[in-house]
Image (cartoon, rainbow, N blue to C red):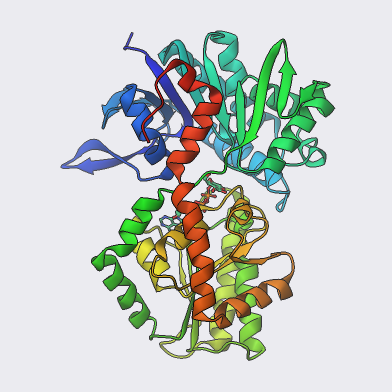
């Protein structure tokens, strides 16, 4: 058996991408906040990351990349359809996001979710050293903590949910609700983005299983399970560095020129997901053009919508609706060579995204519900020069921290239009002041601090020296 690790991360996806070089398969690290934050801890402890490598069928053999052991878990084509697209993304995802799309419940999806969660738990049980710390990530793996504790009671287990945790009334819809809750309660610490989500969780434990709690601490089988809020963040310094790069700044200027040097560039950057409020944002823009409050070519909108979960029906329907709305706006308000909305259904590099953030006068982040929303934080971190306005939904976790944004209720079209207009018309000095406060916050509350706070609360530092940030 391979050498075991004292620190293990378990997540649906591995932090690596497959690339083919000269006909040979190679792996390169995929950029992401989570891996950036956890890299120092993983590298220091020769930690292991367990996850799916992408693709159906057999998994590659475990390997090491940049000091992290990578332990792939296989998923069959049928499991991908049932565990990932089905139970994770057509049942749990919509239910946890206020059921803004109707969750679909299927027995065979649940069964696949159980089987796959057991496989991830087994992999963790195999690679974790005696007394190791295991940190399980997100809604695809909610059964893993209890499954793992059953096999390995010696481990210290943390769980972090990246998406919202719904109120009791909504959670109670789920057919195997008690099993999910017991799954999570297998952890020593269950982390959420928001305090309200942690409260939903402890109240649910009492409501559904009759468990006693004090503060955020639940009594389960003679153990204590702590719940808490750990708002995730970005690698702020890295984002600031990128925005200060002359190449990125030149690209931002070029983007503005390509857009016809308008007075106001309005930007949206999201995965193409129905929780992100892309349609309502487009509608607000259309109505403002129709009302004559905004006009093309002085104002243009750029909407980047990253392809996402394209085999799930909810997502196929959304794409049709968004593209129809873009067509409608351009049909009514565009001119030859001058569309009102530039719609890009593509993925971009980090530097191109930073250039887009720099090129935008107003960033619109209007989800109907979002655990955190890192795009909002990335935009703020990029605007070190002080300009720019963030229009932010109150229903994004980020709104709790970024209070100087132009906050709006995405369910109220007039409120969204009003926030957008206020952002467009704000004085530069006011925008600077707002940005400065938010930037200061992000400098001290970055993703490394997030990981450190969670691991400290889990008690990792009681046994090991504090991980370097
Ligand atoms: P997501 O729903 O994926 O994450 P978000 O937090 O906005 O949402 O993160 C998206 C990331 O993807 C950002 O870092 C962004 O820069 C990047 N991205 C978006 N469009 C891109 C494009 N076209 N090309 C390249 N990169 C692109 C879930 C939860 C969130 C929570 C995060 C982290 O739904 O609420 O903030 O996890 O916990």
Q: Nearer the viewer, residue 170 or 74?
A: 170
In which quarter of the view is residue 240 placed? bottom left
The image shows a total of numbered marks equal to: 0
Q: Nearer the viewer, residue 195 or 288?
A: 195
User: Would residue 212 be found to the left or right of residue 344 on screen?
Assistant: right
Q: Nearer the viewer, residue 246 or 4?
A: 246
Q: Against 223, is 361 above or below? A: below
Whether residue 445 can be seen here:
yes
Q: Nearer the viewer, residue 277 or 79?
A: 277
Whether residue 362 can be seen here:
no
Q: Position of residue 109 (x, y in %)?
A: 64, 32
Residue at 76% over, 37% down: 171
User: Would residue 245 be found to the left or right of residue 146 on screen?
Assistant: left
- Image quadrant for the C terminus? top left
Q: Position of residue 56 (x, y in %)?
A: 43, 34
Q: Position of residue 304 (x, y in %)?
A: 47, 65
Residue at 52% over, 21% down: 459
Q: Position of residue 142 (x, y in %)?
A: 61, 28
In which quarter of the view is residue 320 placed? bottom right
Residue at 31% over, 59% down: 242
- Image quadrant for the N terminus? top left
Residue at 55% over, 85% down: 331
Of all residues, the one furthest to the left in this rendering is 22
User: Would residue 1 be found to the left or right of residue 169 on screen?
Assistant: left
Q: Against 411, is 448 above or below? A: above
């Amino acid at each position: 058996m391979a050498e075991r690790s004292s620190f293990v991360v378990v997540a649906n996806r591995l932090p690596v991408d497959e690339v083919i070089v000269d006909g040979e398969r190679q792996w390169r690290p995929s950029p992401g906040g989570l891996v950036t934050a956890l890299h120092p801890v993983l590298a220091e402890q020769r930690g292991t990351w367990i996850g799916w490598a992408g693709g159906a069928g057999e998994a590659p053999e475990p390997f090491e990349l940049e000091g992290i052991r990578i332990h792939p878990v296989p998923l069959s084509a049928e499991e991908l359809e049932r565990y990932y697209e089905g139970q994770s993304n057509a049942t749990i995802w919509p239910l946890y996001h206020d059921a803004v799309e109707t969750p679909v419940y299927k027995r065979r999806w649940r069964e696949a979710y159980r089987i796959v969660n057991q496989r991830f738990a087994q992999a963790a049980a195999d690679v974790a050293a005696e007394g190791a710390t295991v940190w399980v990530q997100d809604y695809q793996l909610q059964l893993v903590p209890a499954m793992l504790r059953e096999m390995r009671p010696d481990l210290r287990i943390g769980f972090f949910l990246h998406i919202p945790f719904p109120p009791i009334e909504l959670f109670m819809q789920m057919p195997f609700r008690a099993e999910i809750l017991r799954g999570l309660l297998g952890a020593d610490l269950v982390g959420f983005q928001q305090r309200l989500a942690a409260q939903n969780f402890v109240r649910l434990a009492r409501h559904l299983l009759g468990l006693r709690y004090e503060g955020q601490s639940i009594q389960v089988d003679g153990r204590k399970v702590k719940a808490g809020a750990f708002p995730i963040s970005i690698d702020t310094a890295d984002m600031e560095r990128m925005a200060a790069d002359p190449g990125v700044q030149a690209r931002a200027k070029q983007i503005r020129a390509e857009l016809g040097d308008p007075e106001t560039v309005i930007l949206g950057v999201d995965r193409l997901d129905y929780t992100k409020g892309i349609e309502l944002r487009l509608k607000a823009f259309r109505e403002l053009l129709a009302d004559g409050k905004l006009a093309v070519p002085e104002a243009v909108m750029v909407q980047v919508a990253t392809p996402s979960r394209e085999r799930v029906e909810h997502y196929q329907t959304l794409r049709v609706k968004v593209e129809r709305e873009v067509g409608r706006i351009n049909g009514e308000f565009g001119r030859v060579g001058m569309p009102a909305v530039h719609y890009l259904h593509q993925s971009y590099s980090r530097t191109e995204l930073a250039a887009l953030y720099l090129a935008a006068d107003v960033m619109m982040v209007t989800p109907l519900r979002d655990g955190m929303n890192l795009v909002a934080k990335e935009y703020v971190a990029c605007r070190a020069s002080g300009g720019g306005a963030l229009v932010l939904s109150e229903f994004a976790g980020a709104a709790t921290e970024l209070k100087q944004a132009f906050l709006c209720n995405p369910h109220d079209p007039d409120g969204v239009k009003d926030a957008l207009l206020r952002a467009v018309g704000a004085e530069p000095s006011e925008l600077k002041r707002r940005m400065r406060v938010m930037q200061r916050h992000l400098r001290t509350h970055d993703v490394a601090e997030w990981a450190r706070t969670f691991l400290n609360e889990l008690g990792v530092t009681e046994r090991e020296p504090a991980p370097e940030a």
